[in-house]
Amino acid sequence: MLAAILNGKRRGSGVAGKQLILGSTEGAEDILTATIFERLAYLPESVSATFFSHLLEVEEPIGTLDFIEFWPSWSLDGKRVEPDVVLYGSERTLLIEAKRYDDSNQQYALQLANELKAGWECGRLGNAPLLLTIGGLQDYSQETAAVLRAQIDGELDMTGPDYELICRSWHQVYQALEAAIADADKDTSPGLQRLLDDIASTFEWHGLRTQARRWLGQLKPVSIQITPFPFYDFKPMASTPCLKQPELSYPLSQLPVPSIAFVAFPVKEWSLTP
């Protein structure tokens, strides 16, 4: 379906007659999340483990991926709670809440706390789950994650088991996948590279970066060879006077009268007869 949409074959896809500009489209983050994690679910186990190791950077990994669930419907105080993706690993469960943009404030502590509460109440998260936020923050430093963690803990009111919060950007997701595929066996590399190309096309479709930012201070100096030409200082000779061009001016009264001929067209009168 991704190839059909990107190449303009959208009839029957649900987006027929619509522009492919998803920045202002409701539900764009759902399409982005599904397109990415559907493909990540097909990674070989070794590559998947390397990917999550690069992405999560935790001491206790999720283990083998047993099952992936998109938008599960959980109940909390009679209301439906719907996280984006839940990855059930052999060791730990990974709860994912994804937002559309990397550089914006879209992650909310109350929403994240409710997803944890609902998952615990229905017995789907287990002990020490991982909570991964993707996008929706201005930066992804440890300080920002600590602030968000404190806000979530405030909403939880210290109830429920412990959990681990990881905040990543979509760009970091791509970087982790790119690194994992680069480390993969040569036998699987061509197919994995096609998968990476698919995800790169999805990022481009949604206006997300795949390349790191490069600042002016990080650019390498360029060796430019300069060949100076000889400079000659030309000076006028003293014996050669500078001739000034004469200024010509004519008053309007002295201009010749142009010959203009007028041709009059006959006037025809029209009358309406009853």
Image: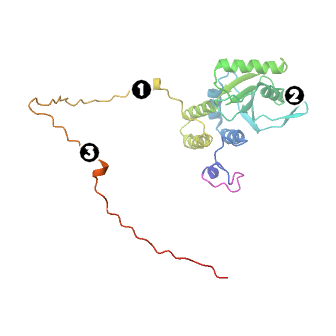
Judging depth in this view, the residue of 54 and 172 nearest the camera is 172
Name the residue nearer the viewer: 109 or 176: 109
In the rendered view, tell whether residue 91 sits above or below residue 274: above
Residue position marked by numbered label 1 in the rendering = 220
Residue 121 magenta-drawn? no
**Closer to the eye: label 1 or 3:** 3
Residue at the image point whose x is 26% and y is 45% from the top: 249
State the residue at coordinates (59%, 43%): 201
Numbered disc 3: secondary structure: loop
**Where is 148 relative to 42, above or below?**
above
The answer for how far apart the CA atoms under marks 1 and 3 are is 61 Å
- Residue under label 2, please give it: 121
Q: Tell me residue 253's x, y (percent).
A: 30, 51
Query: Which callout, 1 or 3, points at the residue further toward the start of the chain?
Result: 1
**Residue 47 visible here:** yes
Main secondary-structure element of the magenta-colored stretch: loop
Q: Quadrant of residue 177?
A: top right
> What is the three-letter code of the residue carrying label 2?
Glu
Q: Which residue is mark 3?
A: 249
Which residue, as the protein is rendered here, is positioned at the far bottom?
274
Q: Earlier in the sequence, mark 1 or mark 2?
A: 2
- Viewed as shown, does residue 68 lie left or right of 194? right
* Quarter of image, res 212: top right
